[in-house]
Image: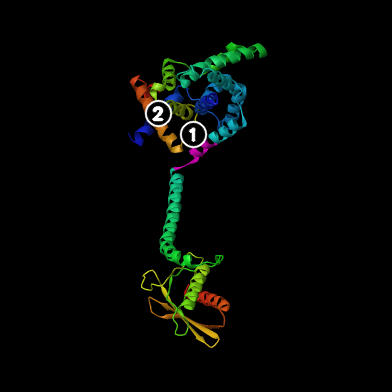
């Protein structure tokens, strides 16, 4: 009985993590593998691995972000064995976006929870600013109201801009 | 921090992300598809983990549906919903308070009358009558006190029955401010016949609002006649 209750509690906690991080992770994975079905499979494998290690994981969001790359690579390696697809080609494709020092700083800033009030705010920002979700779509993903999404996004943008200004990055630099 | 500053920051950060190619827009249809498959994906994970059950599936359905509902709620919807709930609760309470306030003296008044009734109670009628009437002691010059008391008891029993036992009160104290009408009943015996006359007076206007006279010959017949009188009274004062 006690085991069942603990297990349910674990499942409930796991469900909340899944609901919050799913959209963001599937977005990141889709960018790499360019295939929605593969992205879903990778995402599911990632969450299964997380569930099995939940007791050891202190920060689930951080764990998911750091494990996602490894999960993508191991999936692509398996696929390469089956399909003969060159892993180098895929990685090259995934790195198609222009890279420079400033872009790296900005990417790191977006991925750093310290630049946001909460993990949820960070995901919210990513969904709206990077993946171009509307406020209502982002709100649905995170189980918050549209107004909360709009306010949270504004707050996140402000904090992130402050961080980037401190790093010497502004609109004028980008131009 | 005001909204204007946030808007400026939003514009700036979006411009920076765009210029550095960090944006990765997801088409609206893909967003929709992903959201549709989100729950199914979770259930697949539960199956993989071996913890899937019908109860969990139901719980998961409510969980994901709840998130969508919260997002769809606007401030106006929430305010309208809360206002409606308050209004409904307030109205219900007001009606309950009104009925309780009006029932209390009636129930108190009925209680002693009910003690005198020894016969099985009659069924409540379909129509409820809202009035209070004070029944004065039966007057007579030719009928003894015992018979008068029996007639009085029958009258009270009929009032209790016809008014559903809850919305009419009977009292011999016509000075009570709760009482709207007074019933003055006289019974006289001439030969084998009894003549019963009833008069209802509106205590506010002191106007006679009802008057009737019935004749009967035996005690058995009296109950039916008194029932008719009481029904007529109820019709005239309700």
Out of B164 and A127, give the one closest to the viewer.
Answer: B164
- Chain letter of the residue carrying label 1: A
Q: Is mark 1 on a helix, strand or loop?
A: loop
Out of B157 and B50, give the one closest to the viewer.
Answer: B157
Mark 2 crowdedness (10 Å alpha carbons): few <14, some 14-19, many ≥20: many
Out of A168 and A11, give the one closest to the viewer.
Answer: A11
Residue ID at (49%, 65%): B165
* Lower position in the chain sequence, tag 2 or tag 1: 1
Q: What element carries label 2?
A: helix
Q: Is residue A152 visible?
A: yes
The residue indicated by pointer 1 is A143
The residue indicated by pointer 2 is A156
Vertical position of residue A77 compared to residue B96: above or below: above
Q: In which quarter of the image is residue B62?
A: top right
Q: Is residue A95 visible?
A: no
Q: Where is residue B106 shown, x and y percent of the image?
A: 43, 65
Q: What stretch is highlighted in magenta?
A: B65-74
Vertical position of residue A140 compared to residue B145: above or below: above
Residue ID at (49%, 38%): B70
- Chain letter of the residue carrying label 2: A
Chief secondary structure of the magenta portion: helix
Vertical position of residue A41 compared to residue B221: above or below: above
Quadrant of image for the N terminus of chain A: top right
Asked whether residue A84 is drawn in magenta, I would say: no
Q: Where is residue B122 shown, x and y percent of the image?
A: 56, 66
Which dot marks residue B78? none
Is A94 situated left or right of A161 in this image? right
Q: Quadrant of residue A106?
A: top left
Quadrant of image for the C terminus of chain A: top left
Labels 2 and 1 in the same subunit? yes
């Amino acid at each position: 009985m006690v085991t069942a209750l603990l297990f349910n509690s674990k499942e409930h906690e796991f469900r909340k993590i899944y609901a919050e991080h799913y959209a963001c992770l599937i977005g990141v994975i889709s960018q790499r593998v360019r295939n929605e079905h593969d992205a879903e499979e990778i995402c599911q494998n990632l969450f299964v691995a997380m569930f099995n290690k939940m007791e050891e994981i202190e920060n689930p969001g951080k764990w998911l972000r750091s494990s996602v790359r490894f999960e993508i690579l191991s999936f692509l390696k398996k696929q390469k064995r089956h399909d003969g697809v060159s892993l180098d080609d895929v990685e090259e494709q995934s790195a198609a976006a222009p890279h420079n020092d400033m872009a790296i700083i900005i990417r790191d800033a977006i991925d750093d929870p310290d630049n946001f009030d909460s993990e949820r705010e960070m995901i919210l920002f990513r969904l709206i600013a990077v993946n171009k979700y509307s406020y209502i779509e982002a709100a649905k993903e995170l189980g918050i109201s549209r107004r909360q999404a709009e306010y949270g996004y504004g707050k996140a943008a402000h904090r992130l801009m402050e961080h980037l200004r401190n790093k010497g990055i502004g609109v004028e630099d980008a131009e | 921090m005001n909204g204007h500053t946030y808007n400026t920051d939003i514009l700036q950060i979006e411009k920076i992300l765009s210029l550095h190619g960090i944006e990765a827009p997801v088409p609206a249809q893909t967003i929709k598809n992903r959201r549709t498959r989100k729950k199914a994906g979770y259930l697949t994970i539960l199956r993989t983990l071996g913890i899937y059950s019908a109860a969990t599936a139901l719980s998961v359905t409510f969980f994901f549906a709840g998130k969508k509902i919260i997002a769809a709620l606007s401030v106006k919807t929430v305010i309208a919903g809360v206002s409606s709930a308050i209004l409904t609760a307030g109205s219900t309470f007001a009606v309950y308070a009104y009925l309780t306030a009006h029932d209390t003296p009636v129930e108190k008044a009925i209680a002693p009358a009910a003690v005198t009734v020894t016969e099985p109670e009659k069924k409540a009628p379909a129509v409820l009558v809202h009035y209070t009437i004070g029944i004065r002691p039966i007057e007579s010059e030719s009928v003894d006190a015992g018979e008068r008391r029996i007639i009085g008891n029958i009258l009270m029993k009929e009032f209790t029955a016809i008014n559903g036992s809850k919305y009419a009160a009977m009292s011999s104290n016509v000075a009570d401010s709760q009482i709207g009408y007074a019933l003055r009943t006289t019974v006289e015996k001439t030969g084998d016949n009894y003549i019963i006359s009833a008069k209802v007076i509106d205590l506010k206007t002191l106007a006679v609002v009802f008057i009737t006279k019935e004749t009967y010959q035996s005690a058995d017949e009296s109950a039916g006649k008194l029932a008719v009188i009481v029904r007529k009274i109820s019709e005239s004062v309700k």
